[in-house]
Amino acid sequence: MRLVKFIVFLVILSVAGQAFGQSSSELKRRKESLTREIEMLNRSLNQTSSSKRLSLKQIKTLTAQINLREQKINTINSEVRLLDNQISDNTNTVHSLQSQLSQLKKEYAAMVLFAFRNQSSYGKLMFIFASSDFNQAYKRLKYLQQFSAYRKKQAQYIEGTKKELNHKIVELDENKREKTHLLSDQEKEKITLGSEKNKTSRVLSGLSQQEKQ
């Protein structure tokens, strides 16, 4: 039953990981698309800026660029929120696996101790004959027969839990690094956005002066 629960647990983690991967990929594609659009507008803006006279086209281009920049910042916000959820899920999973691994090791240590105490044929017979009735003796006999195979499965189960724990710790570290990188990008985008808004104000002011002249 414990093994079945563990397998179900791994399946759920796998499905959740795929869902996260798909959403994350969609956001990354969206961000890359916005970056390309911003770069195109920037090239267009550089061309119009080479003209001595300011134009409404510059205003429109700057406004579009600002809108795209704000969309990009919102997309980064979505990525950060998604990563926060993943970090929370992975943290809970790591704690759960650590607790599970600790319990498994205790159970395995008890089994090893039992096996050591009853490793001789005499010890096994005494364990069976110490039963309170025939039914218990039969159960103990079957238990001894299955004990060796079960102990091997328990050892494999421990190794599987260790691997899954290590995998989740690595994934958690990657999530945290990616979040740090995203927050840094977000800060840069906000600074650029502020610069673009100031530039738009200057262009509007210059255009207003042209109209007066």
Image (tube, rainbow, N blue to C red):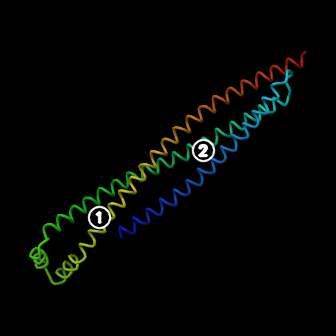
Name the side, left or right, on which 85 lies relative to 30: left
Name the side, left or right, on which 207 lies relative to 33: right
- Report the quarter where the C terminus lies: top right
Q: Amino acid at mark 1?
A: Ala
Q: Nearer the viewer, residue 139 or 169?
A: 169
> Callout 2: helix, strand or loop?
helix
| In this view, 161 is above or below 67 | below
Name the side, left or right, on which 121 lies relative to 211: left
Provide residue 167's location: percent of width, then percent of height.
42, 53
| In this view, 107 is above or below 122 | above
Provide residue 156's location: percent of width, then percent of height.
32, 65
User: Which residue is denoted by mark 2 in the rendering?
Assistant: 78
User: Which residue is denoted by mark 1 in the rendering?
Assistant: 155
| In this view, 51 is above or below 176 | above
Taking the spot 49% from the left edge, 45% from the top edge, the residue there is 175
- Report the quarter where the N terminus lies: bottom left
Provide residue 12's location: percent of width, then percent of height.
48, 62
Q: Amino acid at mark 2?
A: Ser
